[in-house]
Image (spheres, rainbow, N blue to C red):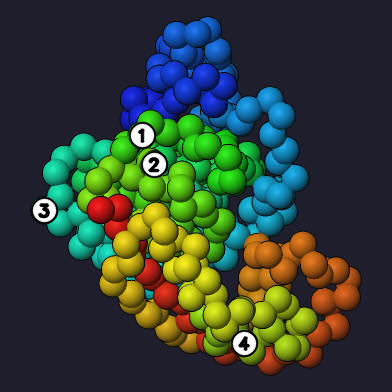
């Protein structure tokens, strides 16, 4: 809930600390106020922000259905283990901030392994955060833009997560406390390859991991990398949900996909392959 993370939040207008007023609004000393939506999240976007890149209601519904079926449970499990390892022996205090949290699926799995740690679900999609706000008793959900200053205090996060989402190295470094860890989950070349060609989906850049490391390198020190690879067995409808929930949804026409989807085996076996890379603020 928002009360669990209010102490870590700052005003997007003036940078002052925020406080939760009767559970209905976040306010700073300068008088800026941000209402808490009835679904439990708050928007800390500045007035000139645009949300056009946020996931739509349809994309979020497809993702929620797909994740709830357990298809990406191996990612959640491996990420939760990496989080527990990263904070093993770490001092108390600090939140877990998920940058691009979506529905809160991965953050909830991580918090289950970290008793007592509050979680901040950060995303630009209010549709996603309506679900994230209910994903775990210790999650507070905040609408914000990953490419602008994050509404979190300096050195407030013991751990940051970034799963299939944009990231900015300078802000991540600012928000992480010294010794804190960022865990980045990104797809590798074989990810969903059985669907990329037949359905015309966006392919994974073979140099993606290297490019991520280069962009984060000036701000954070690279650490352990873990590979997670398994085989998905999907019905045609589940394959359709997989397309509808990700970045390819912005580039594909559902009507055009009907034919290629019908031509797939039912069920279809699909490779899933990701990397979990750790980066540390020294």
Is 40 situated left or right of 115 in this image?
right
Q: Which residue is mark 1?
A: 154
- SS label for mark 2: helix
Whichever of labels 2 and 4 marks the residue nearer the N terminus, that label is 2
Confirm or deny contact between disc 2 and disc 3 (CB under 8 A): no
Query: What's the distance in space between the residues labelled 2 and 4, CA to CA?
Result: 36 Å
Residue 193 badge = 4
Quarter holding residue 118: top left
User: Distance between the Cα atoms at labels 1 and 2?
Assistant: 5 Å
Q: How many marks?
A: 4
Label 3 vs 1, first from the N-terminus: 3
Residue at horizontal 39 percent and vertical 55 percent from the top: 219
User: Where in the figure is residue 239, as x and y percent of width and height?
Assistant: 66, 76
> What residue is pinned by disc 3?
89
Residue 233, image x and y in percent? 54, 84
The spot of residue 256 in percent (x, y) is 88, 75
* Residue 174 circle label: 2
Alpha-carbon distance for marks 3 and 1? 22 Å
Q: Are marks 3 and 4 in contact (CB under 8 Å)?
A: no
User: In the rendered image of this protein, does residue 229 appear above or below residue 138?
Assistant: below
């Amino acid at each position: 809930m928002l009360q669990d993370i209010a102490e870590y939040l700052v005003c997007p207008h003036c940078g002052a600390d925020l406080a939760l007023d009767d559970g209905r609004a976040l306010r700073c000393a300068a008088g800026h106020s941000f209402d808490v939506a009835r679904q439990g999240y708050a928007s800390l976007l500045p007035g000139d922000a645009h949300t056009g890149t946020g996931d739509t209601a349809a994309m979020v519904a497809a993702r929620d259905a797909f994740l709830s079926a357990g298809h990406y449970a191996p990612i959640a499990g491996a990420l939760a283990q990496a989080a527990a390892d990263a904070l093993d022996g770490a001092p108390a205090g600090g939140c877990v901030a998920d940058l691009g949290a979506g529905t809160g699926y991965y953050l909830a799995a991580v918090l289950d392994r970290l008793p007592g740690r509050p979680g901040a679900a950060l995303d630009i999609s209010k549709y996603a955060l309506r679900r994230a706000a209910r994903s775990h008793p210790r999650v507070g959900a905040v609408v914000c833009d990953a490419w602008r200053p994050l509404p979190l205090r300096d050195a407030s996060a013991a751990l940051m997560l970034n799963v299939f989402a944009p990231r900015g190295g300078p802000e991540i470094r600012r928000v992480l406390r010294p010794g804190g860890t960022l865990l980045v989950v990104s797809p590798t070349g074989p990810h969903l390859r059985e669907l990329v060609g037949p359905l015309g989906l966006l392919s994974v850049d073979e140099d993606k991991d290297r490019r991520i490391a280069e962009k984060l390198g000036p701000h954070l020190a690279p650490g352990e990398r873990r590979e997670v690879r398994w085989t998905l067995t999907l019905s045609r409808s589940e394959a359709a949900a997989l397309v509808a929930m990700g970045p390819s949804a912005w580039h594909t026409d559902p009507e055009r996909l009907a034919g290629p989807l019908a031509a797939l085996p039912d069920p279809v076996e699909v490779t899933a392959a990701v990397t979990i890379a750790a980066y540390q603020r020294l």
